[in-house]
Image (cartoon, rainbow, N blue to C red):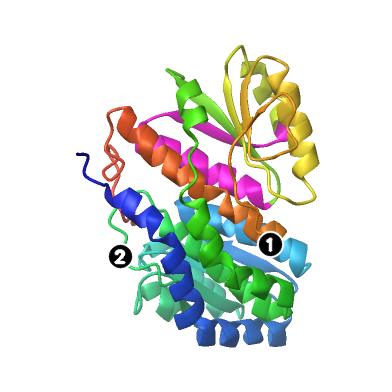
Amino acid sequence: MTTQTHMRREIDEIPDAVARLLDRSAKDLKTAGLALREKDPAFLITIARGSSDHAATFIKYAVELTAGRPVASLGPSLASIYGAKLKLSGGAAIAISQSGKSPDIVAMAQSATAAGAVTVALTNTLPSPIASACAHALDIQAGPELAVAATKSFVNSIVAGLALLSEWTDDADLRAALRNLPEIFGKAVTLQWDDFAAELGEAESLYMLGRGPALAIASEAALKFKETSNMHAEAYSAAEVLHGPVALVEDKFPLLAFAARDAAENSVVEIVDSLAGKRALAFATSDNVKSARKLPFVATGHPLTDALALILPFYGFVESWSRSRGFNPDAPVALKKVTETR
């Protein structure tokens, strides 16, 4: 009998972790959201690395699509290495760190707070240096995460960001969609991508595609392939892949397109179908594909949460794929849980 990995257990815990976040951090989310509403920032910056930076990219698209404010990701080294003094008094900042103690993330958050930005920390560790560095600290309530590859902390960081956005913009539809997530995620974690696993075979490289918030999901998926399976995977916008990267797409080259039920779905489907026509091994999370192969997904009824739900079946797939390749997804080679970059 195979012993269940920490990673698999943590994937299965995601629905409960989300419910815990929405319950226990509701008051702090509302307070921080009202602070953003009062500030009415002209722009927002994000501060993060790794999976947390992919969560920040998701939040970037959500803020731009919903609040209409431009969002930029700042390199933490601007503060920790270069000592740059940025003019941020008209804006807001979201810093994301599961451990709450990465020195460069903390330094950039401190710099943003000192510059006059409304700063919000999304962290799985309170108290922590990142919490002290920001005006508002939100506990993402993911609970202990023992696997090196982040799963539930990635999802909860995004849910916290979306909940913060719903309070900032007073978006009733987004609030309702978030309330439904624990039940929906409970279905999503049970989905099987066996067809994709069977077709990958001995592939050594593949592309992850997406647009908008789903591009952040593609980026997270590519990272997880590298972390858990030592497999080369690159994430591209479904539009950008046609410019240069398509040159590598040959017979049976694997492609996985994360298509949400949003304004970009048709364009993503059109592109992945065209690549399937070039004999690529193309899969997509959409009912609308014609040449590409469909992967199971759970529609959420909201374009933002729909994109987020796509990562759950992928996590289950990549954990199983890693084990099938002889790897231990709990302990990727040459990686550790907390990377303290200065």
Residue 119 located left or right of residue 213: left
Q: Is residue 321 visible?
A: yes
Mark 1 and mark 2: Cα distance apart in space? 27 Å
Q: Earlier in the sequence, mark 1 or mark 2?
A: 1
Label 1: few (<14), some (14–19) or many (≥20) C-alpha neighbours in 10 Å:
many
Q: Which residue is mark 2?
A: 144
Magenta stretch holds residue 307? no
Q: Position of residue 192 (x, y in %)?
A: 48, 40
In the rendered image, the residue lying farthest to the top is: 251
- Main SS category, magenta section: helix
Residue at horizontal 72 percent and vertical 77 percent from the top:
172
Q: Which residues are magenta?
A: 213-240
- Per the image, label 1 sits on a secondary structure element best described as helix
State the mark number for residue 236. Answer: none
Q: Which residue is mark 1?
A: 62
Above or below 89: residue 237: above
Above or below 337: residue 95: below
Q: Amino acid at mark 1?
A: Ala
- Quadrant containing the C terminus is bottom left
Q: Position of residue 339 (x, y in %)?
A: 34, 53
- Quadrant containing the N terminus is top left
Total marks in image: 2
Task: Depth check: give the residue in front, 151 or 96.
Answer: 151
Residue 29 located left or right of residue 127: right
Residue 279: which quarter of the image?
Answer: top right
Q: Amino acid at mark 2?
A: Pro
- Per the image, label 2 sits on a secondary structure element best described as loop
Q: Position of residue 98 (x, y in %)?
A: 40, 64
Residue at horizontal 42 percent and vertical 67 percent from the top:
16
Residue 77 located left or right of residue 341: right
Residue at horizontal 56 percent and vertical 77 percent from the top:
119
Above or below 2: residue 291: above
